[in-house]
Image (cartoon, rainbow, N blue to C red):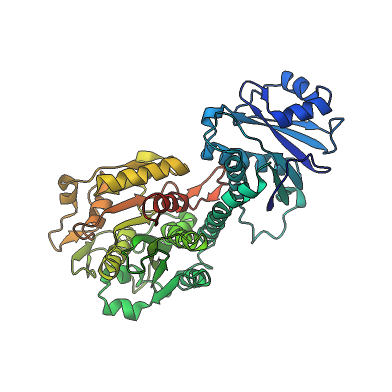
Amino acid sequence: MKIAFAKPELPETGSLAVGVMDGRKLGSHAAQVEKLTKGAVNRAIGASRFKGGTEDHLALLAPTGVQAHRVLLFGLGTAQKLDALAAQAIGGRLVAAFNAAGEKEATVLIEAIPGAPLSEAEIAANIAYGAQLRSYRFDKYKTKEKPEQKPSLKRLVIGTAEANAAKKAYDPLEKIGESISFARDLVSEPANVIYPETLAQQAKTLAELGVDVKVLGEAEMKKLGMGALLGVGQGSERESKLVVMRWNGAGDAKAKPIAFVGKGVTFDTGGISIKPAAGMEDMKWDMAGSGVVIGLLRALAARKAKVNAVGVVGLVENMPSGTAQRPGDIVTSMSGQTIEVLNTDAEGRLVLADALWYTQENFKPVAIVDLATLTGAIMVALGQVHAGMFCNDDSFADRLTEAGKATGELLWRMPLGPAYDKLIDSPAADMKNIGGRYGGSITAAQFLQRFVQKGTPWAHLDIAGMAWSDKDAPTVPKGATAYGVRLLDRLVADHYEDK
């Protein structure tokens, strides 16, 4: 779908969408249509439940006086609540409505809203951004879809008196949106297409945007002592990889970077501690953390973020075989700490342990965030509304929480503490990779914290409940969500870029 900005003129074809404020208050564009159609707008509103709320829309077919063959009234809500997230949600709902109607081309007329926190240009840009995000669809393997089953909308025009300013405001959002789609594609691909080698190849494409990409193979990781990561992948025929991505956009090329680390288990059978068959196909997206980190670095580079950033992803396939890691094995991590592997299905933390240590040893970051679909326990606690956040620094946690609220990618801070940490002490090694039955997401985070060097602000985001959605949301169609790209881009923009 192509998005364009133009002067606010009534179209001669396709659908026309005009906004109505809460309480059925017509804006100037809706009032213009009302006048041209001799009262058709108010008659239609009066005969419906349409109130002008942000989730409301009402279609009028071919009203006399307007050349467009369909007019769609959409709710803007109250002026005070029309912020960026509300505008993005409106854009997403408009795209869904146009596709449901089979429309190929549509024009949305935007105007300034007195009392709104956004300017007219910002409203237009965010509606376009929401439309872009909602238009995503992973359908490359569908060969027999009927035309009526496919999205119909090909072109969306945003009509605004501030078209140039709106386009300027949309440009960086568009680049973030493209990177979100890139990450969604990575997470959506099946495991016979995306595995450590091919995911590393996808990361290499970021070099076209100026990202320095380095890929370490098993021989290099063995020399570095990455026994934790390598143990996870030793049962697979696919070679494990560690991908290091660097974006240097700050004015000071030597300034310490902010770092992001992602779990990249491209398929997780559970290994010898094998998972039940039902639902195992979902484990193709156990690499979502790495997909988000790759997408984030792409977004930073695409919008030329004035920051030094590092992304490190550990890529493995966790398979059962004659060479697979066994429950009870003891491995030595890059940090020198030993780990008793009691459950081979608690593998993501082993991958992250070495990736976290490598990142800190090589880059000395100002702060570090890791993302992983780490535990089912976090879904029991928080469902699919918040990701779990574990953090060793209150100020850093506040920054992440604020970024989450600003982007709609919500976080809920979970506890850390010595009592939980004791649960992963092992009688045979420095630690074991699981605790007891209770507090599973917390003991997983405590495990990771043992690989965070003193003085480094660190946050672990358990995104197990957020990486994939079984239902449509205004800006997130069902499927891979790329949760975290918007959140972390906002964190960087607000706190770590050169001002």
Which residue occupies the foreground of this view, 147 or 252?
Answer: 252
Residue drawn at x 51%, y 50% as measured from the top left: 481
> Left or right: where does residue 265 sit relative to residue 422?
right
Relative to 206, say whether 101 is above or below: above
Query: Farthest residue in the left direction?
Result: 427
Which residue occupies the foreground of this view, 462 or 433?
Answer: 462
Instruction: State the image coordinates of residue 123 (x, y, percent, origin top left).
Output: 59, 40
Residue drawn at x 77%, y 34% as measured from the top left: 71
Residue 337, quarter of picture: bottom left
Which residue occupies the foreground of this view, 322 or 14?
Answer: 14
> Left or right: where does residue 98 sit relative to residue 13?
left
Instruction: State the image coordinates of residue 40 (x, y, percent, origin top left).
Output: 80, 24
Relative to 148, say whether 236 is above or below: below
In the picture, the quarter occupied by the C terminus is bottom left
Residue 258, quarter of picture: bottom left
Residue 288, quarter of picture: bottom left
Instruction: State the image coordinates of residue 101 (x, y, percent, origin top left).
Output: 75, 40
